[in-house]
């Protein structure tokens, strides 16, 4: 149907669509005839756009199909958009216009008048000064209030950042909260442990690894931290705080999947590659008389990403 | 009907003179002038879809057990926020479409701003009298990036939690004020239950409202100063050439609005983005290998990967490695951008005159070369964010690829900058002769 209409307009106005015509406009009609032909694509785009829009509404009301909704809505908007752009393009042809630019800055005399109005010379200086002082003071007061109110948004960071994570004597428990016996792992294997009662704690998550004790090269002051070849490190990366989730047994390396930092398990989790600059915090361990593994104290330092007063 | 309303308004507001001037306002035609418009129209779409999503979204970190219509996650413990995002995706009519429009819209919004920024930079449109809009525009870019980050961090899926964790670590790394700043912004030590309400308020009110106000100022200044022109007949410092606001420019611009809406909607309908149900709820014990942030943060992620493991100790203070790559580098990039027009003017050109006709890139080889080099630098960082993916794809090792990228990071900008400088100089000499 739209093709029919387009055809009729293309072959000259035969009076099939006489609505916009008025008898007095006959002369104008002659002049605008070629323009009307150019309006046809606009109209076609508009018609198809309307059809797509109706389809979209039908799809929306009757289905939950995201893809069909996106298709039909996108298509209708595209066709409507094309109609508008074509209309604008057609109306702009050969109609470039120019406009003078004003110089942005005002006349110096006019500027001077504003200054004098705002701050009259020699008159009431004291009163004006008081106004300025009051204004500044009130602004400073409000700024101080706004900054102070930020305090409501948090507790001081020190307690959280410096608080104790593991207590000496804490039993190591697995992700189900079961205590870890000292035969839990074979050499070259690993598990996630928490302090008893803190299962799932982000800050306290610790990786327990069993290695061959003869291979260990821990710092001298940590010689008794690894009973039976068990070493435990904070699982929070010192770089950006991701869990150091991968253990590569053949090279005894802990790897953080986020940014590929690597830590040497045998050497106190010293950083060996990637962007991390500091070793993982180590947890001192001892094998208790009860047959379970215990923490010999807190981490060797605060776990997780670094900050100013670590 | 319309004439009656117009008459009634004019009888109360005396608008005829202004309205006539406004309808005659001239806007130049050039494809590169549409980039800012694309950003504006994406923003409108973001506001509309954002209001829709906020109606259904539950910004809460309360733990719930999922029993919704997405069966693979049935019985899984998650946050109420993630549950409501799943509800939007599977149960709300057109919910997934709108969610995907919102996400695609953001990617395009920020891409359009970045492209607009480059157009401004390479044509010298930041020069007097347009420095204010340069500063406002950069602030808009910063706010858009901030809001994108806040937005995708709200959802509570695996990826969003990972982004939060890294954002927290970057904020914490800032010397002296880091811990307080981080705790105020995120509401406590990661993972704090208050984080989501902080980010939600920023994401749906504070940042968008600021963006809207700044856009109004940006456009008001544009209206007052008139748009720049590319050089051409009749286009001078004292005269603008283009088409009138009414009807030509208005029709084209409405058309562009519809086309922007169309592209984003069609993308949202056809190309899946951020399928949160596949990632699962965030678990603090897991980390997803080859996780990437949205594109506009890729360069920071890349810098974090390439920066060597070196930190700085000052007395008892520590400046972690993450500060240099995650905080200082973005600060330098944006600081340079903010200062650029003023540095150029006070230290190099000493130019007090107005510039309403644009400078073509070859006319200022240094400016173009510097821009190309800086862009290349950021592009290499962007690709470095996927170094693990590149390693898997090429069967190489991450270490080798990282070493290679570290060299490329400095070699490529130098080479591209030099090539740009030479090309621009040659073209300039051809056009203006030896004296140029």
Image (tube, coloured by chain):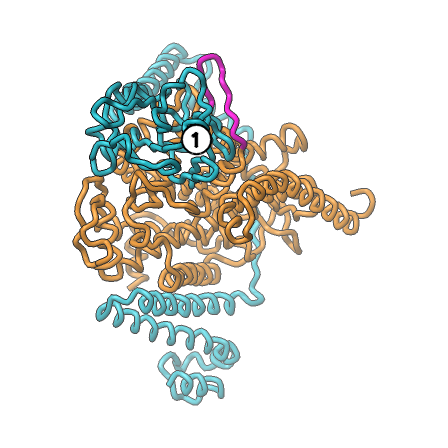
The crowding category of the residue bearing disc 1, from other C-alpha atoms within 10 Å (few below 14, some 14 to 19, many at least 20), is: many
Q: Quadrant of residue A70?
A: bottom left
Q: Is residue B10 visible?
A: no
Closer-to-camera residue (B392/A27): B392
Chain with cyan colouring: A
Q: Secondary structure at mark 1?
A: helix
Residue B12 in percent (x, y) is at 29, 48
Residue behind mark 1: A265
Q: Is residue B74 visible?
A: yes
Residue A126 in percent (x, y) is at 38, 10
Q: Is residue B109 above or below residue A62?
A: above
Range covered by the magenta-colored residues: B308-319
Q: Quadrant of the C terminus of chain A?
A: top left
Q: Which residue: 29% across, 58% down? A: B96
Residue B270 in percent (x, y) is at 38, 64
Left or right, residue A82 beside residue A58: right
Closer-to-camera residue (A289/B432): A289
Q: Quadrant of the N terminus of chain A?
A: bottom left
Residue B403 in percent (x, y) is at 59, 39
Chain B: what color?
A: orange
Q: Quadrant of residue A161?
A: top left
* Disc 1 chain ID: A
Q: Is residue A157 above or below residue A244?
A: above
Q: Which residue: 44% across, 73% down? A: A42
Q: Does B312 lie within the magenta span?
A: yes
């Amino acid at each position: 149907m739209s093709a029919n209409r387009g055809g009729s307009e293309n072959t000259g106005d035969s009076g099939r669509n006489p609505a916009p015509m008025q008898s007095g406009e006959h002369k104008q009609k002659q002049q605008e005839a070629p323009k009307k032909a150019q309006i046809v694509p606009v109209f076609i785009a508009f018609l198809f756009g309307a059809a797509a829009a109706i389809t979209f509404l039908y799809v929306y009301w009757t289905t939950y199909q995201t893809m069909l909704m996106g298709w039909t809505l996108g298509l209708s908007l595209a066709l409507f958009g094309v109609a508008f752009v074509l209309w604008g393009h057609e109306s702009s042809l050969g109609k470039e216009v120019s406009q003078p630019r004003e110089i942005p800055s005002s006349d110096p005399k006019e500027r001077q008048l504003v200054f004098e109005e705002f701050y009259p010379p020699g008159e009431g200086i004291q009163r004006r000064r008081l106004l300025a002082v009051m204004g500044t003071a009130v602004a400073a007061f409000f700024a101080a209030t706004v900054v102070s109110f930020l305090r409501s948004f948090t507790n001081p960071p020190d307690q959280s950042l410096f608080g104790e994570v593991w207590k000496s004597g804490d039993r190591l428990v697995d992700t189900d909260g079961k205590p870890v016996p000292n035969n839990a792992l074979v050499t070259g294997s690993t598990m996630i442990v928490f302090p008893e009662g803190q299962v799932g704690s982000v800050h306290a998550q610790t990786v327990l690894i069993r290695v061959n004790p003869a291979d260990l090269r821990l710092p001298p002051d940590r010689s008794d931290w690894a009973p039976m070849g068990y070493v435990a490190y904070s699982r929070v990366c010192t770089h950006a705080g991701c869990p150091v989730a991968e253990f590569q047994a053949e090279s005894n390396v802990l790897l953080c999947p986020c940014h590929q930092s690597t830590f040497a398990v045998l050497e106190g989790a010293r950083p060996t590659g990637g962007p991390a600059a500091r070793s993982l915090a180590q947890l001192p361990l001892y094998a208790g008389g009860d047959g379970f593994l215990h923490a010999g104290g807190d981490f060797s330092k605060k776990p997780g990403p670094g900050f100013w007063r670590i | 009907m319309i004439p009656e309303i117009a008459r009634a308004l004019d009888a109360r507001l005396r608008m005829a003179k202004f309205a006539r001037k406004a309808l005659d306002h001239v806007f130049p035609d050039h494809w590169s002038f549409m980039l800012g418009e694309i950003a504006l129209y994406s923003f409108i779409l973001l506001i509309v879809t954002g209001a829709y999503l906020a109606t259904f979204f539950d910004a809460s970190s309360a733990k719930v057990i999922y029993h919704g219509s997405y069966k693979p996650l049935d019985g899984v413990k998650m946050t109420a926020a993630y549950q409501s995002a799943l509800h939007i995706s599977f149960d709300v009519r057109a919910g997934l479409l709108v969610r995907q429009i919102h996400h695609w819209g953001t990617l395009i919004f920020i891409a359009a701003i970045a492209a607009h920024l480059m157009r401004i930079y390479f044509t010298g449109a930041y020069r007097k009298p347009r420095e204010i809009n340069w500063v406002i525009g950069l602030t808009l870019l910063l706010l858009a990036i901030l809001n994108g980050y806040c937005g995708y961090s709200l959802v509570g899926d695996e990826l969003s939690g990972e982004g939060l964790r890294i954002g927290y670590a970057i904020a914490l790394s800032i010397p002296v004020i880091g811990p307080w700043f981080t705790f105020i912004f995120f509401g406590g030590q990661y993972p704090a239950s208050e984080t989501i309400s902080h980010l939600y308020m920023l994401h749906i009110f504070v940042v968008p409202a600021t963006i809207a106000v700044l856009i109004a100022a940006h456009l008001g200044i544009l209206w007052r100063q008139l748009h720049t022109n590319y050089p051409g007949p009749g286009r001078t410092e004292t005269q603008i050439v283009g088409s009138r606001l009414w009807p030509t420019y208005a029709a084209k611009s409405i058309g562009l609005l519809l086309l922007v809406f169309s592209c984003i909607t069609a993308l949202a309908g056809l190309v899946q983005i951020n399928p949160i149900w596949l990632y699962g709820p965030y678990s603090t014990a897991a980390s997803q290998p080859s996780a990437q942030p949205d594109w506009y943060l890729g360069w920071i992620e890349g810098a974090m990967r390439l920066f060597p493991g070196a930190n700085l100790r000052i007395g008892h203070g520590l400046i972690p490695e993450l500060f240099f790559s995650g905080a200082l580098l973005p600060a330098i990039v944006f600081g340079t951008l903010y200062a650029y027009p003023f540095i150029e003017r006070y230290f190099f050109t000493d130019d007090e005159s107005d510039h309403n006709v644009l400078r073509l890139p070859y006319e200022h080889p240094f400016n173009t070369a510097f821009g190309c080099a800086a862009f290349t630098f950021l592009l290499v960082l962007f690709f470095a964010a996927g170094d693990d993916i590149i390693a898997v794809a090429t069967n190489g090792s991450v270490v080798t690829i990282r070493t290679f990228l570290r060299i490329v990071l400095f070699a490529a900008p130098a080479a591209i900058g030099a090539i740009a400088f030479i090309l621009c100089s040659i073209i300039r000499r051809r056009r203006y002769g030896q004296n140029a």
